[in-house]
Structure formats: structure tokens, C-alpha cells
């Protein structure tokens, strides 16, 4: 294909052959240089908040029904960034850097016009299999999103099928409620994740299509989001249909939204009086501002050795500048260091201590809310945030 440089055609074909005959952890497979991204997977949770005003708006909703729609609108508005942005910035989907155990990524979106500051914290909580845990918190608005991500991949009909493992819990604090109002002090939403199909592999220009169904459950409502690609209900790629219904036994109206998640959508049933339009992501988004968490004795304004942009700096530089020899040398150095750490731990009978999360085998919030929409599986593990935000600082010299 056009997208594969002539000198890498052979290695691309053998890469495709090996993913076709292998299922499991694609992230650890060696891929030809042209498909490498200089961005670590620890940076991906930032996609959840690139429209911070839509996140903040969840706190300003006036009723459970309004809030269910605000959560859905924010969620749908993140999909363009999550699943198409590498095509926009790098020409196609690319293979992200595979984070090391304990890798950290901190960021923020500043307060603007009273929406409050939003903070981001990410930690790689497992390397094998890769699992990334994150928190996004807007304290002024009483909003907190805690989640984790892993993937199970398989190969089918020339595409990579990615089943996302993990979920997120959004907690909305009722900041104005007096105990007399009868309103609960917090409302929780369970957010599940769609399945992905990676197409365009043969031509060396991979892109993502979303498929099947994901859910948002909480606050008296269940939102069911169905994803379809080309040739289904609208015949267009990136189509979706979302149904927002009162939870079993709860009051409220049903709403149905249809459209394209990477552009716009409209209400086809229900809706807010006089408003046919639902979401619109044609306008600009706001990338996260990376901040330094220090630690490991690093001075304020500097990143510790495990912070993503510092850890991968030379690898990323090599990939960006087309110097793949130094990229792979630096990557090898990081991997060897990791292997040595693991050997040292085994020898000392210790294990790596996570900084910000503690694993639990089953998440009670997932179980309670998931049951309302009969989400499978009935339980999932999770990573509980230790509520220990570090003192971060702007990156000096940035
Ligand atoms: C959570 C997101 C996730 C992470 C990425 C599958 C994938 C790793 C996981 C699911 C985010 O919220 C959303 C977006 C993109 C997903 C990545 C796309 C991708 O290709 C990689 C996998 C591991 C590969 O790198 C496959 C090989 C590659 C050559 C294809 C481009």
C-alpha cells in the first residue's frame, strides 16, 4: 500500500502475519518504524476532558434527567479525540508506546469562566497485561472520574478486534444539597467502554471503528449507546444511536439521540424543549497542560524519572525525527532497566508499590449499577484512588 514505505513493506507484512496468528498482548510486539507513535498510552486518559466545559456542565444540571443528558453529551463528545485524533495528527492510527509499570502522567486544564480547574493523574498499574488507571477531578464542581483500561485483542477478517476491559465511575457531589433537601450527597455513574475494530491494516493506514454497545448507568437513568460503521443505520462511518431511559422503577422521559460521534448528533425522540441538536464537536478542543509531579527527589517543576514525558523523551525524539536507531536503543535501555528491577524485586522478595491506587477484586459500584442494565460481566475488578494528589508544578522551561 501507499502508506507503507517501500523499505518497510516486508516487515509490515510479517508484522500483520504475526498478529493474525497470535492473540493477546499486541502492545509488546515489535512493529515497523513507520507505524510507531511517540505517545505513551498513559497520555490517553486525557481524552476524557478535552472539552472541560462539557465535563463541568454535568455539575450544573438542574435535574436527574438533565444530568443524564449532560453526562451522555460529555461522553459522546470525547469519542472523536479518543478514537480519531491520531489519524488527524499523525495520518493514521499508530502503535502507542507501551507504558512501564509505575509510569506516571500528570496534567490539568485551567479554570476559565468559572468552570473550575480540572486535574488529571494517570498511573500504569500493570505492565503484563498493560493496565492504566486514572483520575480526572474538578474539585470546584464536585466531579471525579476514576477508571482503568486494559485491552483483549484478536484478529478477524483482516481487522484487529479490541475488547476494552475496565470501566469508569463518575462521582457527582451534590454541593448545594442540605441534608433536608432529600437529595443524595453523591450520584454515581458507571461508564462502560465500546469495542473497537481496527481496519485499514493491509494498506498500512489503520483507523478505528466503534462497534456494539456501551452503557452509562446512574442517577435514575440508563443510557445505551449503540455503535455502527459504514453500511448500517445511517450508512455512514462513526454512527451511533443513544437511548436514555429511566432506570427500572424510576420516573422520567425517554430520549433518543442519533448522529455521528466525530461530528454532530440530534434528538430523534424527547430532547430539551425547542432544541433538536445534541452534541457538536466540530469546534476546537483543549489539550491537557502537562505538569510535573516531582518525586524521587526531583526539584519542583521537574519530572521524576517515571513521568511519561521524561521517561520516553529520547525514544519519542527518535521517532519524531526519524532516527529509529536511537529510538530503539533508548527503548531497549528502558526495557532492560525494567527487567533488572523485576529481577531485583524477585531476589529481594518484594514487589513494586503503586503510588496512587490500590487494586480491588470486585467493584461494588460496578456491581450495583451494572445490574440495572444487566451489564456483563456482573462484576469487574477496579483500582481505588488513594486520594493522594501530589503537589504538581508547571514544567519549568515549557
Ligand atoms: C484507551 C484508546 C485505547 C486506550 C487504545 C488498541 C490500542 C491500544 C488501546 C483503547 C483510550 O481511552 C482509547 C484508543 C486507541 C487504542 C489503541 C489503538 C491501537 O492500535 C492500539 C493497539 C495496542 C495497537 O497498537 C495495535 C497495533 C498497531 C500497529 C495498529 C495501529
Image: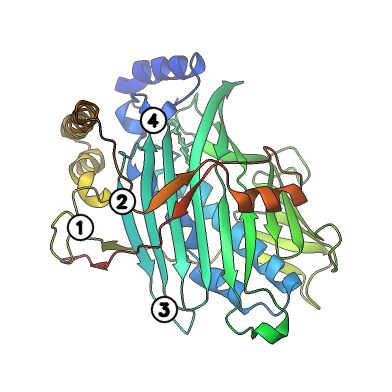
Q: Residues within 10 Å of mark 3 (few under 14, many from 20)?
A: some
Question: In the rendered image, which quarter is residue 116 located in?
Answer: bottom left
Q: Is mark 4 within 8 Å of ligand 1?
A: no
Instruction: Give the residue pinned by disc 3.
Output: 111
Please identify, in this view, whether the residue under mark 1 or under mark 3 is nearer the observer: 1
Q: Say whether disc 3 or disc 4 marks the residue closer to the N-terminus.
A: 3
Q: Say whether disc 1 or disc 3 marks the residue closer to the N-terminus.
A: 3
Q: Residue at x 27, y 67 (%)?
A: 392
Q: Is residue 293 left or right of residue 365?
A: left
The Cα atoms of the two marked residues, 3 and 2, are separated by: 23 Å
Q: Secondary structure at mark 3?
A: loop
Q: Is residue 103 left or right of residue 193?
A: left
The correct choice, above or below, for 329 with respect to 122 in the image is above
Q: Say whether disc 2 or disc 4 marks the residue closer to the N-terminus.
A: 2
Q: Is mark 1 within 8 Å of ligand 1?
A: no
Q: Say whether disc 3 or disc 2 marks the residue closer to the N-terminus.
A: 2
* Residue 128 badge: 4
Instruction: Give the residue pinned by disc 2.
Output: 104
Q: Residue at x 57, y 56 (%)?
A: 169
Q: Secondary structure at mark 1?
A: loop
The correct choice, above or below, for 258 with respect to 397 in the image is above
- Assess whether mark 2 and mark 1 are in contact (beta carbons under 8 angstroms): yes
Instruction: Look at the image and tell me in which quarter the C terminus lies.
Output: bottom left
Q: Camera-side residue: 237 or 347?
A: 347
The Cα atoms of the two marked residues, 1 and 3, are separated by: 25 Å
Q: Position of residue 182 (x, y in %)?
A: 73, 80
Q: Say whether disc 1 or disc 2 marks the residue closer to the N-terminus.
A: 2
The correct choice, above or below, for 159 with respect to 121 in the image is above
* Residue 295 badge: 1
Amino acid at each position: 500500500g501507499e502508506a507503507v514505505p517501500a523499505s518497510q513493506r516486508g516487515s509490515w507484512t510479517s508484522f500483520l502475519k504475526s498478529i493474525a496468528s497470535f492473540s493477546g498482548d499486541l502492545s509488546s510486539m515489535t512493529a515497523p518504524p513507520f507505524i510507531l507513535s511517540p505517545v505513551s498510552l498513559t497520555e490517553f486518559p486525557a481524552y476524557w476532558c478535552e472539552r472541560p466545559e462539557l465535563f463541568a456542565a454535568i455539575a450544573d444540571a438542574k435535574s436527574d434527567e438533565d444530568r443524564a443528558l449532560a453526562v451522555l453529551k460529555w461522553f459522546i463528545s470525547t469519542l472523536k479525540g479518543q478514537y480519531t485524533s491520531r489519524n488527524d495528527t499523525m495520518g493514521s492510527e499508530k502503535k502507542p508506546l507501551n507504558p512501564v509499570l509505575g509510569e506516571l502522567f500528570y496534567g490539568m486544564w485551567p479554570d476559565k469562566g468559572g468552570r473550575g480547574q480540572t486535574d488529571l493523574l494517570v498511573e500504569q498499574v500493570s505492565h503484563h497485561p498493560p493496565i492504566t488507571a486514572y483520575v480526572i477531578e474538578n474539585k470546584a464542581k464536585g466531579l471525579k472520574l476514576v477508571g482503568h483500561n486494559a485491552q483483549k485483542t484478536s484478529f478477524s477478517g483482516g481487522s484487529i478486534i479490541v475488547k476494552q476491559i475496565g470501566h469508569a465511575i463518575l462521582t457527582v457531589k451534590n454541593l448545594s444539597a442540605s441534608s433536608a433537601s432529600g437529595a443524595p450527597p453523591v450520584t454515581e455513574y458507571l461508564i462502560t467502554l465500546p469495542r473497537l475494530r481496527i481496519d485499514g491494516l493491509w494498506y498500512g493506514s489503520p483507523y478505528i471503528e466503534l462497534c456494539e454497545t456501551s452503557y452509562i448507568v446512574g442517577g435514575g437513568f440508563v443510557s445505551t449507546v449503540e455503535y455502527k460503521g459504514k453500511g448500517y443505520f445511517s450508512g455512514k462511518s462513526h454512527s451511533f444511536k443513544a437511548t436514555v431511559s429511566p432506570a427500572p422503577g424510576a420516573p422520567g422521559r425517554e430520549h433518543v439521540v442519533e448522529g455521528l460521534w466525530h461530528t454532530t448528533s440530534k434528538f430523534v425522540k424527547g430532547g430539551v424543549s425547542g432544541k433538536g441538536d445534541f452534541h457538536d464537536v466540530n469546534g476546537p478542543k483543549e489539550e491537557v497542560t502537562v505538569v510535573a509531579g516531582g518525586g524521587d527527589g526531583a526539584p519542583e517543576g521537574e519530572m521524576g524519572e517515571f513521568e511519561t514525558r521524561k521517561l520516553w523523551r529520547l525514544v519519542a525524539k527518535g521517532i519524531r525525527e526519524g532516527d529509529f536507531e536511537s529510538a530503539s536503543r533508548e527503548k531497549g535501555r528502558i526495557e532492560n532497566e525494567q527487567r533488572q528491577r523485576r529481577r531485583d524485586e524477585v531476589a529481594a522478595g518484594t514487589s513494586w508499590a503503586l503510588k496512587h491506587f490500590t487494586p480491588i477484586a470486585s467493584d461494588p459500584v460496578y456491581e450495583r449499577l451494572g445490574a440495572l442494565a444487566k451489564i456483563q460481566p456482573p462484576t469487574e475488578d477496579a483500582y481505588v484512588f488513594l486520594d493522594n494528589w501530589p503537589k504538581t508544578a508547571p514544567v519549568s522551561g515549557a
